[in-house]
Image: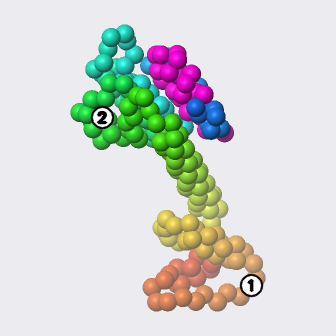
């Protein structure tokens, strides 16, 4: 699934400028003009990997309270999504609070194009890496569950991918007629591997 940036700004001109900037750098993006639309899109579209949001959405409002409320709503919907806050009215206290709460960055308008694009690209790469790690961890959990159902692991509890590969190999070997020599330093678990091979052998 291709990654996408959600731009949240009530000013269509600002939204279009950001959209154009990202499209020039081959970054897919879409625009939401209201906090409600942003929340709806984030709930519906799993390809949104990053949010760039304004801090004020009503005319003559500069407090940043609307942006703060939106930030926390978005974090409730997707706690892990990176959010870049962008505003012409930068308040230090609000910036510090939201960065402490997990905001990826706080950018003042007018923004620096190169810096903003670099930040977005870095955050998208990081989000992609984290997603791959989550998928790998889930795959390992599924494989572990299947192994537990189909084999006797003799009470062995393990966590690492390398240990999972070793236990899987031991169970496969157990079903063959091949003689097995297990080597390793003291305390590495040779006896437990031998026990697993014996328990799963005919």
Quarter of the image for the C terminus: give it. Answer: bottom right
Q: State which tag comes first along the sequence, 2 or 1.
A: 2
Alpha-carbon span between mark 2 and mark 1: 65 Å
Mark sitting on residue 195: none
Q: State whether residue 191 is above or below residue 199.
A: below
Mark sitting on residue 178: 1
Residue 86 image offset from top left, x and y in percent = 41, 30
Res. 132 visible in picture:
yes
Residue at 60% over, 87% down: 182
Quarter of the image for the N terminus: give it. Answer: top right
Which quarter of the figure has residue 194?
A: bottom right
Taking the view exactly as shown, the residue that stands out farthest to the left is 93
Q: State whether residue 69 is above or below residue 186.
A: above
Taking the view exactly as shown, the residue that stands out farthest to the right is 177
Residue 107 image offset from top left, x and y in percent = 39, 34
Is residue 4 magenta-colored?
Answer: yes
Between 130 and 94, the residue placed more toward the observer is: 94
Mark sitting on residue 95: 2
Residue at 56% over, 66% down: 161
Which quarter of the figure has residue 100?
A: top left
Residue at 51% over, 36% down: 113
Secondary structure type for disc 2? helix
Between 35 and 62, the residue placed more toward the observer is: 62
Residue 167 image offset from top left, x and y in percent = 60, 72
Res. 199 visible in picture:
no
Residues shaded magenta: 1-20
Q: Is residue 38 left or right of residue 169?
A: left
Q: State whether residue 96 is above or below residue 174.
A: above
């Amino acid at each position: 699934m291709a990654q996408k940036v959600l731009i949240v700004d009530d000013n269509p001109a600002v939204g279009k400028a950001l959209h154009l900037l990202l499209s020039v750098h081959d970054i897919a993006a879409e625009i939401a003009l209201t906090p409600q639309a942003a929340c709806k899109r984030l709930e519906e579209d799993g390809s949104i990997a990053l949010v760039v949001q304004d801090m004020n959405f009503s005319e003559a409002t500069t407090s940043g309270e609307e942006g703060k409320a939106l930030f926390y709503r978005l974090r409730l919907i997707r706690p892990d999504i990176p959010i870049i806050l962008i505003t012409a009215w930068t308040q230090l206290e609000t910036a510090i609070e939201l960065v402490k709460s997990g905001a990826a960055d706080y950018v003042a308008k007018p923004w620096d194009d190169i810096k903003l694009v670099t930040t977005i690209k870095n955050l998208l790469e990081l989000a992609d890496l984290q997603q791959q790690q989550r998928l790998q961890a889930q795959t390992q959990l599924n494989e572990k569950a299947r192994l537990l159902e189909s084999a006797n692991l003799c009470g062995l509890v393990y966590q690492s991918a390398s240990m999972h590969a070793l236990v899987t190999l031991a169970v496969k070997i157990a079903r063959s007629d091949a003689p097995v020599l297990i080597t390793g330093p003291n305390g590495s678990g040779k006896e437990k591997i031998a026990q697993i091979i014996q328990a799963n052998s005919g």
